[in-house]
Amino acid sequence: MFAAIALTSLAVGCGSSTSHASVPVDSLGMAVLTDTNPDPNVVEVQLVASLSVAHYLANNSTDVWAYRDGAIDGSVGSVPGPRLVAKRGDDVIVHFKNELPDATTVHWHGLRLPVASDGSTSSQAPVPPGGTFDYRFKVMDSGTFWFHPHVRGYEQIERGLYAALVVSGDEDLDVTADRTFIVDDVKVTAEGPLAFDGDKLDMMVGKQGNVLLLNGQHGGTIVIDSGGRQRWRFVNSANGRYFNLRVADHPFVVVGSDGGLLPRSYTADTLLIAPGERYEVIVSFDDAEGAHASLETIYYNRGHELPDQGPRVLADIVVGPHAGRALRPLPTVLRSIDPLPITASTVVKRFTLQENENGAADGPTFSINDQMWPSNPPVMVKQGDLEIWEVVSTKEMDHPFHLHGMYFQVLGADGKPDTSRGWKDTINIVRGTSARLAVRYDPLGMWMFHCHILEHAERGMMGDLMVMK
Ligand SMILES: [Cu+2]
């Protein structure tokens, strides 16, 4: 489906250890879940959550929980799991099986879908060990999404349960490769096991992993064709780490965000991506074959006086052979999105996000409007209504605010108007500021909204939204 698939699937089988010095090998491809349905407009997959092993450290292995492809006999779970690939308008059927020793769900982050398939604990009972569940939905939007559990996410996602979902149908951008990159960090001990050590700083700011990962690898290699132009789809699956990405001397042309393409692209030297968010960028490399660069993350001050660790490399970039063809110019207008019709009388709902550093005996707690999940009552709204959510972060730290099942338009944030005008489902609320979001309540049912710092969500910063007729 994508130009990148041939390149990356080839790379998976090779492995960087066998690479010849003159032939750089891309190590960052991801498998795709097997579509077992012959209908070209139906994607039917078997997704299994299973025990597996990852190799985050050079010398020790790490026991993980990971998704595997149930359609392949003897498949082994990988971090990230195999991607789900579909095209806009497809019907998707996911036969899910839980082989974990713990109950779990699968939440389809960023999709507009029937609430019965949302995979939160407000929409379904968790799937017990040995249990199964079928998720069914039509993919309504092209873009970059991801899926992960919604049961104690701070633990289950950290253990390795996450994967990308890419919906095609907007390939008017002429690129030489279309690639998906999930950024993450994990906290592991020197011996290899994941560290669940009850660290209070981790509870306060989200787990601070000591190993940075790109597609589950530390120190991987991206091969770019000389003269090529690649589309990179980024997902941040970390519990609490903000990534501020850059490739020196190669600015990003940002073309998409959570809900697909933006109306117009913009150019940026750095790309801030908070937990849960997605961005799509175009990266061009005119460098000669053999040139090197790095994909790095640099400091972003997200509060709580976290120190600057300096630039940290996520992957090496090696320029390979020339792309061998001329590329059409990128269009300036990518998409048309009508602004939601806000007026002076549009109802405003206010959500204040607050930390309480000594809220509980074992650490901090987090609230929305002074109430804590799961004891807070749902916010009741009417289908079809358009309202403004004013989400306020108090002065201590930033919070990435996520709404299930529907997109919003950002009217303004951090005191500035939004100029990108894309559809969002997750937005970073900068500490000491607020954002105004226009939300149309389309799908019926009980949806969730929460901070996507997973420790914050678990410790209270989460709520339900009931959309009624
Ligand atoms: Cu938060």
Image: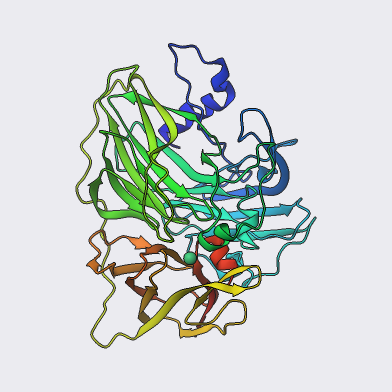
Residue visible at 37% across and 67% down? 431
Q: Is residue 256 left or right of residue 65?
A: left
Residue 57: x %, y % from top left: 61, 33
User: In this picture, is 248 found above or below 114?
Assistant: above
Residue 31's place in the image compared with 323, above or below, is below
Please state, as top left, top right, bottom left or bottom right, where the N terminus lies in the image. Answer: top left
105 or 332, which is in the foreground?
105
Q: Give the residue displayed 51% in from the left and 41% down from the top.
A: 212
Left or right: where does residue 271 sit relative to residue 60?
left
Q: Residue at x 30, y 20 (%)?
A: 324
The answer, for residue 105, to whether it is visible in the render is yes
Rendering quarter of residue 420:
bottom left
Residue 139 horizontal/vertical position (percent): 48, 57
Give 87 or 83, whichever is nearer the viewer. Answer: 83
Vertical comparison of 262 with 388: above or below: above
Q: Nearer the viewer, residue 324 or 318?
A: 318
Q: Measuring from the top left, give residue 144's x and y in whole percent.
A: 44, 50
Color theme of the render: rainbow
Q: Nearer the viewer, residue 369 or 318?
A: 369
Q: Is residue 90 left or right of residue 149?
A: left
Q: Is residue 325 above or below residue 73?
A: above
> What residue is drawn where x is 44% and y is 32%?
315
Residue 117 x/y as whole percent: 60, 65
